[in-house]
Amino acid sequence: MFQSFIDFFFQKLNISGLLSCSNFYKKAGLSFTQILKELFALVFTGKNLYRTLSAKDPELSFKKNAAYRFLHCGYFNNGEKLLYMVTSRLIS
């Protein structure tokens, strides 16, 4: 049920489009949108990323390396732009 709220939020704000506008993209594997959605869900369910990855939680569709590559990739230089665009959509 909680996942449906996150899906609605991502659809309503068109997060995948905002990621593209902020130059977040991948050539292969899971999309940034899917990884971000699952990390976003961890925050609101009170779960810790490290412990969730250590427990090999079947809820996650990615493995440890994908999560850490996502968090440490150079595309986060545009993170401020993404945050600005999400915030402006929320306000308007």
Image: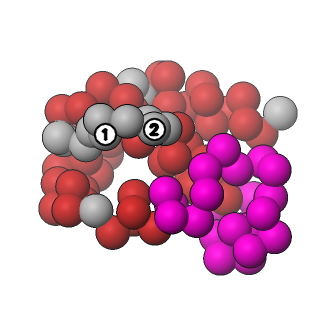
Left or right: residue 55 versus residue 9 is: right
Q: Split into 4 quadrants, where in the image is the C terminus?
A: top left
> Would you say the residues marked 1 and 2 are in contact, meaning their CB atoms lie under 8 Å apart?
yes
10 Å crowding of disc 2: few (<14), some (14-19), many (20+): few
Q: Split into 4 quadrants, where in the image is the N terminus?
A: top right
Instruction: State the SS at label 2.
Output: loop
Q: Which mark is residue 26?
A: 1
Left or right: residue 92 versus residue 49 is: left
Q: Label 1 to label 2, Cα distance in Å?
A: 7 Å
Please give the name of the residue rendered at 73% of the width and 36% of the height, measured from the top-left corner: 3
Q: Quadrant of residue 90?
A: top left
| Viewer-side residue, 44 vs 35 | 35
List x then y, in percent, for residue 28: 37, 36
Q: Which mark is residue 29?
A: 2
Q: Is 6 a magenta residue?
A: no
In the depicted structure, whether residue 75 falls above or below residue 8 = below
10 Å crowding of disc 1: few (<14), some (14-19), many (20+): few
Residue type at mark 1: give it: Lys
Please give the name of the residue rendered at 37% of the width and 29% of the height, measured from the top-left corner: 16
Q: Is residue 89 visible?
A: no
Left or right: residue 51 versus residue 84 is: right
| Viewer-side residue, 47 vs 70 | 70
Q: Is 62 a magenta residue?
A: yes
In the depicted structure, whether residue 5 falls above or below residue 73 = above
Residue type at mark 2: give it: Gly
Q: Which mark is residue 7?
A: none
List x then y, in percent, for residue 47: 74, 68
Q: Is residue 9 visible?
A: yes
Report the span colored magenta: 43-67
